[in-house]
Amino acid sequence: MQERSVTVGGRTSHLQVLLDALQRSRPGGETELAKAFHDLAPRLHRRGLLIVLSDCFGDMPQLVKALAHFRHAHHEIIVFQIWDRAELEFPFTQWTRFDSLETPGMRRVLDPGHLRQAGQVLFTHAFEEAGSHVIEVSAGAAPLQSDNAMLFSVPVWDRLPALLASGDINPDPLRGETGFLEVALQPYATAGEAASDLIQARVTAPDRLQPKDLAEARVVVLANARELTDLQLQALEGFVRDGGGLLVFPGDRANNDWFNARLVADGKGLAPFAIADLIGSPDAAGQPAAIVAERYDHPALELFNDPRNGALNTAAIRMFCKLKAPDAPEGKTAILARLDTGDPFLVEKEFGDGRAIQCSVPIRCGQGVSPRVGGRLANGFRELAGLRKPLRDVPQRRARCQRRIEGLYH
């Protein structure tokens, strides 16, 4: 921008002089805001009010140092950082070319989808071996260098351990409560192939669930479990609170009264919603319910935005549980997907550092869904349980100061 200076004036009419000078100015070239302030400081001999209108892009340490000149001279300073609405909302949806207004010829072609990840920066890193690793992430954004770096403790897994508490264990293929889920999580082992699965799923009966079993798992699935003892429930709450994942499915053997009283507990428990009623039956006649087709924002459902991965709305739902939200829930809850009856299909609740996802449809093929889509739904539930989290080559979880928190999924 061409430099323009206006003499100091105290009359009301002087405001018009300032506005006229701004209107005649034409932007162009790069702006060195810190240098401009250093040059301006000696010209202001009287104490006054300095108002800065700028995007404040540039060398922040130098800018702060330049503004210190005015504070040292006892000037009052007001800084307005100017943003375009497009910079805040970033409405771009396709590959876009961005041209620099300050540097002629500088342009970038970018994919807005990768830039619009809620302010997140996603990156990958390959670890040579499994175990606990400490990594440092740094960025030169803040003047205070200690604010530019953060240490994370990252446990890296060879295979992700998942514990399936099945209310009906059946040795016949695909006849047990979690039969289709076991196939989805361990396709190579099921087919007898030599390739190694990334998921290590172990099936146990709910009444045999022990606290030591939870210590060896990252995800727990309760499928048609009648109920848990107080000791089991306490251990499960601690597991999720410390960053574990819980996936809950209803069924004909589950004690819904216990579920509502202990697992929901008026919004204080692990489960997001109470079970109000059971609708339909496996052999119910008439038009079955379906999952509403939509574009899913939740990371666990994003794979269904690609038609090549199948569509959830092709599932024939003949039996499901009506869910009811508690009056005063503790923790953030969200409905991830609905049935075409308006009832929730999947509900998520944050619990401590972990989360629980509740499904209103049994996972057993033939009870709630048609056999044709049973495997596809089980594949989706694999994603919902967080089981697509990377293992050796990308961290499964990250933690600050040895405390588990939710990681970034790729």
Image: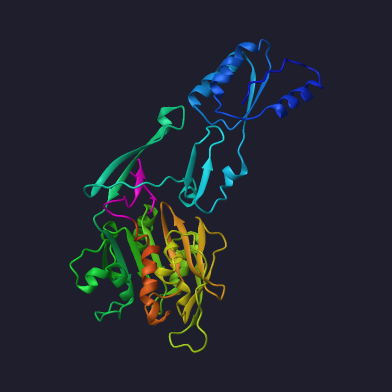
Instruction: State the extent of the magenta-drawn residues as a range.
Output: 390-410
Q: Can see residue 228?
A: no
The percent position of residue 356, horizontal first and vertical second, equals 42, 61
Instruction: Please report the residue visible at 38 percent of the width from the left and 63 percent of the height from the top.
Output: 383
Taking the view exactly as shown, the residue that stands out farthest to the left is: 194
The percent position of residue 330, horizontal first and vertical second, equals 51, 56
Taking the view exactly as shown, the residue that stands out farthest to the front is: 105
Can residue 182 be found in the magenta stretch? no
Q: Can see residue 207?
A: yes
The one of 123 and 347 positioned closer to us in this rendering: 123
For the C terminus, the image quarter is bottom left
Instruction: Please report the residue visible at 23 percent of the width from the left and 55 percent of the height from the top.
Output: 158
Q: Quadrant of residue 403?
A: top left
Above or below: residue 201 compared with residue 99: below
Can residue 392 be found in the magenta stretch? yes
The one of 104 and 173 positioned closer to us in this rendering: 104
